[in-house]
């Protein structure tokens, strides 16, 4: 158990809909990262937050947004969903802002029909 | 695009044999990490090697890093069926902001009992 909790574990929705994925980092970790894993794109870095502020941005679509709340949990919002958004979405946390080991949650599997 | 490229994409060995996976990357790095992923599960950190290190050991794992060739290898000795998983290398960019690890496409290791 990594200590990172993600909900929901599975989500099935239709094209055009909006979903919210939630992540609770390990106790004490200030950094939260979101990654998308799909068969054709592999593991793609989406965005990082550190203590409530956006720290780094990767290949995140404009239809996607994220935030980190004062209690350090984070949410990833995906809107106007398309079939190609079907993927595993991972949250990871770290106790450091720079470089170090990431602790991953078990992921949220999104299926867009 | 992925920073790291693993080789081979898939590897099948017998229990007790050694497994070697290679990773190449393109830009200067701060450190390189190896992660393991069981099918559909979250990634688990295995080992981190810094850019000024050449070799590191952890249990049955041995990692080497050659920054002149921009490559790394992961050796798993005396493999077990439980080692069956996907293995990813991940690079942390030199001078980059945050810990935005860039993952390779992974090596699928199958250890046959």
Image (tube, coloured by chain):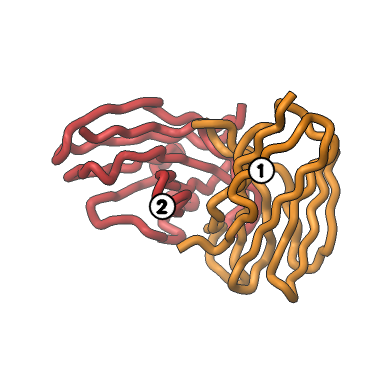
Quadrant (top left/top right/bottom left/bottom right) for the N terminus of chain A:
top right
Q: Is residue B39 above or below residue A44?
A: above
Tell me what hue chain A is rendered in: red
Tell me what hue chain B is rendered in: orange
Q: Would you identify the image quadrant in which residue B10 lies? A: top right
Instruction: Please rate how many residues cluster around mark 2, counting C-alpha atoms within 10 Å: few if below 14, some from 14 to 19, many from 20.
Output: few
* Comparing labels 1 and 2, the label whose residue is closer to the camera: 1
| Residue B18 screen position, x and y as percent | 81, 41
| Residue A72 screen position, x and y as percent | 46, 40
| Residue B104 screen position, x and y as percent | 56, 55
The residue depicted at 34 percent of the width and 42 percent of the height is A76
Residue B35 or A41: which is nearer the viewer? A41
| Residue A64 screen position, x and y as percent | 28, 50
Residue B80 or A83: which is nearer the viewer? B80
Q: Which residue is mark 2?
A: A41
The residue depicted at 26 percent of the width and 43 percent of the height is A78
Q: Would you identify the image quadrant in which residue B24 lies? A: bottom right
Q: Which residue is mark 1?
A: B11
Could you give the CA–CA distance between mark 1 and mark 2, rounded to whole angstroms? 21 Å
Q: Is residue A68 left or right of residue B5?
A: left
Which label number is shown at residue B55?
none
């Amino acid at each position: 158990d990594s200590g990172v909790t993600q909900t929901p574990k599975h989500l099935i929705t239709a094209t055009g809909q909006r979903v919210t994925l939630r992540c609770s980092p390990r106790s004490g970790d200030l950094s939260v990262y979101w990654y998308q894993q799909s068969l054709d794109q592999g593991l793609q870095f989406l965005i990082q937050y550190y203590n409530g502020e956006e720290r780094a941005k990767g290949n995140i679509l404009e239809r996607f947004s994220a935030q980190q709340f004062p209690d350090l949990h984070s949410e990833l919002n995906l809107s106007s969903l398309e079939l190609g958004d079907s993927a595993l979405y991972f949250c990871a946390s770290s106790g450091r802002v720079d470089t170090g080991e990431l602790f991953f949650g078990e992921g949220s599997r999104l299926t867009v029909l | 695009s992925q920073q790291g490229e693993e080789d081979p994409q898939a590897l099948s060995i017998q229990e007790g044999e050694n497994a070697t996976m290679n990773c190449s990357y393109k830009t200067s790095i701060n450190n390189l990490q190896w992660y393991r992923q069981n099918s559909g599960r979250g990634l688990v950190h295995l080992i981190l090697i810094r850019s000024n290190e050449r070799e590191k050991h952890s249990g049955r794992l041995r990692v080497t890093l050659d920054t002149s060739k921009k490559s790394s290898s992961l050796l798993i000795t005396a493999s077990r069926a439980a080692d069956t998983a996907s293995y990813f290398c991940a690079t942390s960019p030199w001078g980059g902001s945050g810990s935005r690890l860039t993952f390779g496409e992974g090596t699928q290791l199958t250890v046959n009992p």
